[in-house]
Amino acid sequence: MLLEILLAILFGIIAGTITGLIPGIHMNLVGTTLVVLSASLLSPIAPIYLVVFIVAMAISHTFIDFIPSIFLGCPDTDTELSILPGHELLKKGQGYEAILLTAYGSLAAVLILILISFPSYFIVEKIYDFLKNFMAYFLLGILALLIFLEKQKLKALFVFGLTGALGLIVLNSEIKEPLLPLLTGLFGASMLIMSIKAKTHIPQQKITKPKLKGNFLSPLFGALVASPLSSLLPGLGSGQAAIIGNSISKTDRKGFLILLGATNTLVMGFSFVSLYLISKTRTGAAVAINSILGNFSLQILILILGVSLITGIISFFLTSSLARIFSEKISKINYTKISVATLGILIFVVFIISNFLGLVILTISTLTGIYCISLGTRRTNMMGCLLIPTIVFYLIM
């Protein structure tokens, strides 16, 4: 059994590396595919090994997916905040350092996850019992807080409203996998088109480890406080959790990248803990595990935590190696051509999965994303496309 688990971890890390590096391949999509296949092609495989595979893939994905975000400017919903500080360092030849900073945060998050998992047993269920009766109002409070933290509050409110309306329309359509064209357009294609237009040039990158100034624990504390909110409050992603964490524990640009890495991994990891504690799924990986297993025991949670630790350690060194390769090659390749090729991949993936209607939504969401970015507010405000529909759902239920 041990050998099979180790093999499942290995294949999961390989899969997580692929999903992390290829723009447009989101964990939610992979999780849904695995659930479908588990009842057919993957039926001979014991469910426990599929769970180990999913956990390893999910955790490694949270490490790796900062690489295309920072080097290619093509994030998903969990890494879009890394574009600004990450690209600033990339343009200074410090892209390798930017990736390492997120990897430091992610590795620390795995250790934090293990430390807080069992104490959470005594408080999370009680907190959630209180929250669920007033969920819409708590989400409205989070929305108000995010707008308050913006310098341009009216513009932020407008972006939330605009993308929220778009989200309501798309999520209530009959399109297959509506989140793919919606989020790809808002956060991926829009940034790539702006990069192509600007004809971004990437300088020679330095392979140096970051010299951390200030308190390394400060961004980790912010991530620790804010990340569980994503598991307790539906519609709240790691991007919003990172902003809240940064408001709790102010940090500099490099510290913010650590906070982003920690939040990204901790949100994913804590979704497994939440599945056990309150039987709620907040990530695609948690949904897949819940669908495959049904009953979620303490022994399974302990196994998941162990797999997360092993995967986190391996993924840290893997991320460092891949970041070094990207740093050595990125300045030798035409960045505009990379952006065009990446955009082509996104369009192809959307068409294959969501058909022609998906391309229509991709176009609309891309134009919306470009417009919202031009307003100069945080890109995370575009997560109104998920937050607003969630608030509406809880208000009318």
Image (cartoon, rainbow, N blue to C red):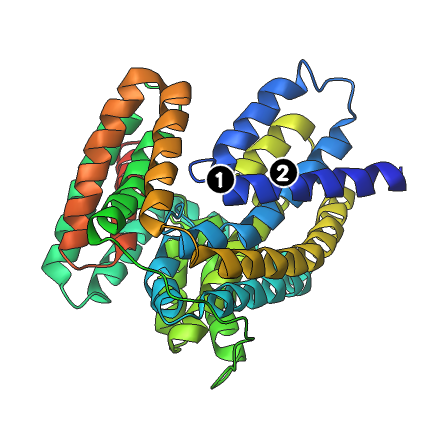
Residue drawn at point x = 27 percent, y = 18 percent:
357
**Residue at 63 percent of width and 59 percent of height:** 321
Residue drawn 38% across the image and 39% down it: 342
Residue tagged 1: 22
Q: Which mark is residue 213?
A: none
x and y percentages locating residue 193 in the rendered image: 24, 44
Badge 1 amino acid:
Ile
Residue that numbered label 2 is attached to? 15
User: Which numbered disc, 2 or 1, marks the residue that appears first in the sequence?
Assistant: 2
Q: Distance between the residues labelled 2 and 1?
A: 11 Å
In the foreground, 127 or 26:
26
Q: Can residue 123 be seen in this view?
A: no
Left or right: where does residue 262 sit relative to residue 298? left
The residue sitting at the top extreme is: 40
**Is 275 on the left-hand or right-hand side of 165?**
right
Residue 125 image point, x, y percent: 56, 51
